[in-house]
Structure formats: C-alpha cells, structure tokens
Image: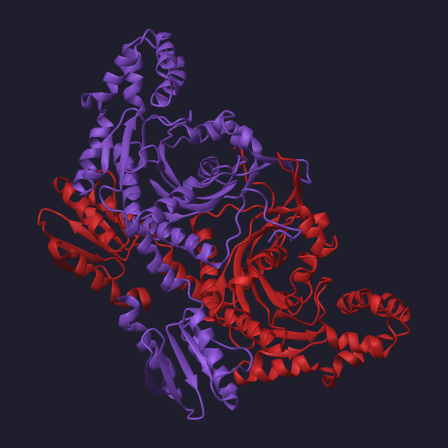
Chain colours: A red, B purple
C-alpha cells in the first residue's frame, strides 16, 4: 500500500498469518526431528558483545554486522550466527552437563547484506551441535540428523545429497606437497573456490604453491583419498540405512577459517550449486572463545529458513506435505458455533467456553448476524464443522462443511461428542 | 565462571536447556490457548524504523529504546513492544482478511532499563488483539482469553482477578466536573497514581481541577458508575461461566496515552500490586500509524514472561503442573538404547534410526562404553525406557527405568511394540 507512512525495513519480513504458519511448519519440523534424535533445545541472546564475533571469525563477517553502541556505551551486535554464543555459553555451563552435549537452537540472525530473492537482512536458522565428542561417531550422528530433517520435510532419495569432506585430508595433501602449515588456510581458500574461479586465475594461485590444477583435481577425484573419519562416517550411516544419502566430495572445504576436520553440505540434487545446510567440526572454537579455560571438541551444522522453504515450494511432494500441515494447523478454528437463535447467545457462549476448555479450537461471531453470514464466517475460518445453536437448543446440529452433511447431538454431551467427532477422519478433508 | 572473557550482556538471558524448556512451556501454553480460542498467529520484525515508536507513544518509551543508526543511515530501534508494528502491518494487509481479526504474537521485546529481579533488558511477550470490532463483545472475548490463559497455567479462582475499568466513565466524570477535554490525559495520569501518590500531593493536583480526593474516591467506589461497556462485558463473561474472575475497578486507567475505552489488568490476588497482564481498547492507533488511511477499532492485551513465570513458581499447584510438563517434554529422549554387545552396534544404529523415523525420541551412546555407564547415561537423559541390545539380539530387553522392571520383545516389531508401550501410562512416572 504505497500511501502508508510506515513499512517494514528493507530485508525484514512481516509474517502475516499464512507466512507465520509456514514459519511454524519449519520450526516444528526442525524441533520435532531434533527432539526425536535426542537433542535438547537452548537459546542464546539476540544481542551480544561485538568482540565475541570478531574473536570467533577473525573479522570475516564484520562488514555485515548490525553493530552499534548501546546506551551504556557498549559495542554490541545483533547476532549474525549463533555458534560464537553457543561456545561462550558452553564454556560457562558445560560442567553441569554429561558429555556429549547434543544441543539445538532455532533462532533469528541478522546480516546487513543487499536484500535479494532468497536472502534478507534477517533469517531464521536451525543450529544443531554435538560438543564433547571428538570421534567420527559424532559427525555421523549429526549428518544423520541433517538427513532425517530432509526426510521429515518430505524429500526423498534423489532430491538431495550430503557431500562430505575432511579438511584433514587436505592438510595431509598440503604436507605431502610442501605447503607450510601457516599457509594452509589460504590454500583451503583456493580449494573452496575451485569450481567458481577462472581456470587461469586458479592455475596462477596454485602455481604459488608449486601445484597444478590437474594435481588438485586428481586428488579430489580419487576415492582413495577419503580420510579415516570419512570411512567411519560412511560405515556408521550405512548401518543406519542412510548410506545412499552421502557422497565423498573433497572439493568441499567450507569457507570459514574455524573448521578443523570433517565438513559437509546438504545439496539440492536438482540445482547442484545450492547448499541447503552446511557444517562441520570446529574443535578449537570453545577454547578460543574461553581463552583456553575450556577445551571441548565440537561439530555442528546450520540450516536457514529461506533456502529450505524455496526448495520445499519447488518440490511437489514436499510442498504438498507442507500444505496438508497448513490446512490442519493454520485454520482459525476447528468448530465454528453458529448462533441461529439470538436468544441462545448466552448458551452459545457457554458452549464455546466448554469446548475451548476441553482443548477444542472453537469460535463464534461476536455480534448477532444472519445465519448465512455466520456460515460464511465459518467457511472463511477454515473450520471443519459448524455447530448450530437454534430454537431446538439443547439439541444441536453439526454441519460438516466439506461434505455439507449434517448430524445432531445434545448440548449436555457436546464436549465428548465433538472430541470424538474431531478424532474421526472425515473423508472429504483428508482424501 | 569468573575467569571467562565473554559473558551475556547485562539484562540478557542465556537459555540453557532447563531455562529453554520453561520458556517453551510458557510459549506452548500461550499458543495453545490462543489457538483454541480462535486466534491466529503473526509476527512482526524485531527491528523497526524508530519513528514508528515515537509516533505511537508520543515519546513515552523513548528513553528506554535500543536505538541506533544502521549501515544504511536509518534510525532504527529494537522493538520495545509489538502493538505499533501490528498497527503498521494491519494497515497494510487488513483488506485481505475478514473482520474481526483475532491475532496473536509471541515475541521478544527490548528496553534499556536497569536490570533487576523480575525485569531484564529483553523479555518475551504474549500479545493478543482483536481488530475491527468496536463493541464490548470483543473486549469480553479478549478478557475471556486472558482468564483461560491463567487457567491453562493451572491457576484457580482466588489466585487471580481481572480488574476492569473504562476510560469513558472517567471522561463522563471529567465532563460533569468541568475538566476540559484537552486536560483529560493529565487528569487520567493523576487517577493512575491515586494509590501510589502522597495524600497531600494528590490533593494538590486534584485541587487544580477543583476536585477533592474524596470526590474521586467516591466515584471509584460506587458500582453505579460502571459504564454500559463494563455491564455488557460482565453479562457476557457471566454467560461463559467466567463472571467470578472479573471485578469493576475504576482506579485502573493504564498509563499509556493511546488507550481509548475499556482497560483491564490481570492481578495476582496475593500480591495485590502486581499486574500479570494488562491491556485495553486503542481505537485510534491504526488510524494514527496509517495517517488516517485505515481506521480500525482495536482491543488488545500483553503478558510478559518474567512475571507469569515468577507467579507460577510461587504457586504450588501451578508450579507442579509446569514440572509435570517439563518431565514429559524436557527429557533428552524417551528410549535410550544400551549396546550391551558391541558386535551389535550396526543393528543398534538401525534400531535407533527406525524408532526415530517412527516419531519416537531415541538415543544411544556414540562410543563403546560399559553397560553400567550406558545405564547411567540413560538415567541422566531422562528416558523412561532403556532398550538393551545384547547377545540375544534380535531379542531385546526393555527396562522400565522408574520401576526397574523388565520386559522382552523382538527387534523386527520394535517400532509397533515400543509405540504401544509409550502410549501406556507407566505407574511410577504419572502417579
């Protein structure tokens, strides 16, 4: 509406009810998968001391920060990600929890980027981490969760693949080819861009390390270069029946400097350059953030809401699953009470109250209205049933809105009757 | 931990798992009550144009704002409340929704105040609003939700009361006593503090309007001054069986200037000065925010997480209800798989995967460990059952951890067996 004085800031979203219901679908799916895989939920503050992020990332994100001085003169930042906060929190509280910690968070993050399709200045992120276990069994457990998340959204084999790599394989490669340890981060930066860099630029950069593009590509292509950690992960996931979802892909190193070992990305199989989620080991971060006070190995991954939502909407079977959820969960109510006889308004109010108290979502028109108009409100509310309170009260009529069929019942047993009725599938809706 | 370099900012909370579970209990209760009363969820941005808040509040909140300039030079503010954003959002989108809108939001707000017990610099707020209905039936519907929320938390009659007032009663009073219309906001400000002001100061302030404290107190004390809206609300709530929860209390006017009619507060009956929630009519706000483009009457209320949590924890029956929820929902898993024979690890991984896929929360030790240690992990996880995979595999042993009893089953039918088993109450836990 062009004439309005106020609008949302660029890159920020207004979640009107359907958008909010889609958000809730993502959140509830994330939460239920994490819970059934034995992860517990935590949450860190949205605002943190800026130096926490600078210390973690070495400045990698600093150009994109929503950073300001608060009224107390503190240099503070809206969180661009949650792993730094997690490391801070775990360093402080870890002694009270048995290891490994399997923790997840669903939270909003903020980055000052140019808003574009599929990317805003805020986004929601599903973060899952295992801390206190250095072995590949933790990486496998984490990748299993990433796979289960995709399956829970209705994706099937062929829709996605998890590409798994190990920075340690590259560190071995670098050692064998005389790349100094201090140069490894820069070298990994070149590998990270291998498919996006112009061939001559790539060759020039590798030449500085006395390497050729062919050597690097040959290393990537040879399955014999799989690290012991990768092989253990593959064996573990195969035992779980999830082996078909992972692939060795040594071209994946992940950009951020803080990764230390196994790294992986969940890829959309149709648009091969699009990563839906990514993560890996960051065994030194807790020690870095706590200045060495606490040392805990860790592995984690994150999935953002923009990409997964787009992928769901582009994939018919996943989109239909979401739509079924929305139909069940985004209706304003399940039972709309139609007051056909205004002298029964008091009885209708009591009936609505009783239904609600019993856990049934029920509503009615707040003011007297023609019966036809109330039925229209019932249809618009998304209710399955219209419950008519008329001159026959305490006898009630129940209209099944999808099939236009009718049943009768009694006000005194309305709660039991309608609870049972709501538990029955009614053909037209679920067909 | 004093030695750590980083801590949460003052007034900001780290939600470690138990704290996060309590937060989730509040959120899920709020959400389920709102949904069964026919409200739909929305969410507005955490960051907004500062002028939105200045326009709404006339500067009342401006000293407490987390306000800064973003990288694009915009004057922006972390939301101190959500009603201004709601008015903005509704002005833009209302045409696509039938009226009245019954909307709710659960979101975090930020105010730069001195942190103290029961108040931080961030808090979560449950906001519920009805827009597009000017009559008292909407106020009654909203107050009914406030009452149902308290009942859902386990509070009972006697724990709380909703005090209802009407600014229009005071506007009538002011008119009858020669208070000019432009002076009404100031006059209401005096009434708002009537029980907190020193008697001589109060008398002095009222004298400026040629009024005495006795006159004002007599007006408050006389039930004949109940407004027609109050009487309609009382009749409506009495029909619902909720009449006992409300009281006329004309001393309530609510501080904020934007309220226009019926106002109310939910009070803890034991500490009478503590309001758990409050709200009222704000019929002109949407027009103010939209510069007159959209005019929608509205009524709403908000409940913050700090006070309700404290009240729950101080009230034994409400605290026990929360504890039961936490036991059921904050466990890391329901079934902990104990790998008693390491040669069955692959089978155990498959079993855990199958259980999880079927919606059962299941976990296992990631690495080989002594059986006693795995049982310790099972206990610590909060699981109800330990499922032992040993040399008898595919026969499985199920240990009920609370009662130390044992059952046996078969791996091939584990999902059906354990789903059924989880649906049964097991005496010791629920007794």
Q: In this orientation, which residue lies closer to the viewer: A308 or A379? A: A308
Q: Is residue A311 left or right of residue A393?
A: right
Q: Is residue B3 left or right of residue B274?
A: right
Residue B207 is drawn in which quadrant? top left
Q: In this orientation, which residue lies closer to the viewer: A246 or B377? A: B377
How many numbered marks have been drawn onto this rendered protein structure? Answer: 0
Q: What x and y, as percent, mark residue A144?
A: 54, 74
In the picture, the quarter occupied by the C terminus of chain B is bottom left
At x 33% / y 23%, what residue is drawn? Answer: B195
Q: Is residue B139 visible?
A: yes
Does residue B203 sit above or below B323 in this rendering? above
Q: Is residue B425 visible?
A: no
Does residue A228 sit above or below B78 in this rendering? below
Does residue B391 sit above or below B156 in this rendering? below
Q: In this orientation, which residue lies closer to the viewer: A9 or B78? A: B78
Q: Is residue A159 left or right of residue B337?
A: right
């Amino acid at each position: 509406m062009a004439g309005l004085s106020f609008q949302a800031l660029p890159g920020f979203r207004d979640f009107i009810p359907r958008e909010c219901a889609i958000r809730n679908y993502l959140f509830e799916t994330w939460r239920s998968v994490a819970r059934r895989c034995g992860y517990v939920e935590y949450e860190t503050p949205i605002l943190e001391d800026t130096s926490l992020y600078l210390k973690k990332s070495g400045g990698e994100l600093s150009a994109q920060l929503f950073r300001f001085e608060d009224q107390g003169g503190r240099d503070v930042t809206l969180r661009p990600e949650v792993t730094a906060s997690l490391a801070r929190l775990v360093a402080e509280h870890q002694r009270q929890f048995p290891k490994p910690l399997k923790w997840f968070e669903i939270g909003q993050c903020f980055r000052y980027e140019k808003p574009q399709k599929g990317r805003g200045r805020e986004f929601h992120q599903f973060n899952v981490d295992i801390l206190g276990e250095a072995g590949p069994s933790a990486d496998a457990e984490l990748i299993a969760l990433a796979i289960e998340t995709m399956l829970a959204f209705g994706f099937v084999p062929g829709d996605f693949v998890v590409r798994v790599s190990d920075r340690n394989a590259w560190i071995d490669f670098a050692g064998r080819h005389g790349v100094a340890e201090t140069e490894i981060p820069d070298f990994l930066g070149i590998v990270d861009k291998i498919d996006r860099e112009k061939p001559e630029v790539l060759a020039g950069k590798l030449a500085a390390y006395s390497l050729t593009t062919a050597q690097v590509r040959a290393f990537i292509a040879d399955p014999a270069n799989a690290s012991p950690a990768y092989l253990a992960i593959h064996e573990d996931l195969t035992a779980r029946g999830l082996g078909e979802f992972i692939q060795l892909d040594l071209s994946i190193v992940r950009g951020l400097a803080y990764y230390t070992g196994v790294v992986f990305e969940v890829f959309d199989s149709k648009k091969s350059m699009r990563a839906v989620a990514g993560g890996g080991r960051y065994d030194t971060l807790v020690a870095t953030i706590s200045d060495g006070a606490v040392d805990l190995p860790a592995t984690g991954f994150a999935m953002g809401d923009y990409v997964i939502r787009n992928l769901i909407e582009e994939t018919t079977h996943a989109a239909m699953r979401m739509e079924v959820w929305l139909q069940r969960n985004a209706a304003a109510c399940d039972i709309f009470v139609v007051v056909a006889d205004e002298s029964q308004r008091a009885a209708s109010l009591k009936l609505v109250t009783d239904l609600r108290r019993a856990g049934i979502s029920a509503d009615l028109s707040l003011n007297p209205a023609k019966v036809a108009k109330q039925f229209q409100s019932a249809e618009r509310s998304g209710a399955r049933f219209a419950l008519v309170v008329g001159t026959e009260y305490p006898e009630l009529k129940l209209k099944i809105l999808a099939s236009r069929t009718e049943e009768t019942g009694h006000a005194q047993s309305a709660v039991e009757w309608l609870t049972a009725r709501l538990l029955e599938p009614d053909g037209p809706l679920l067909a």
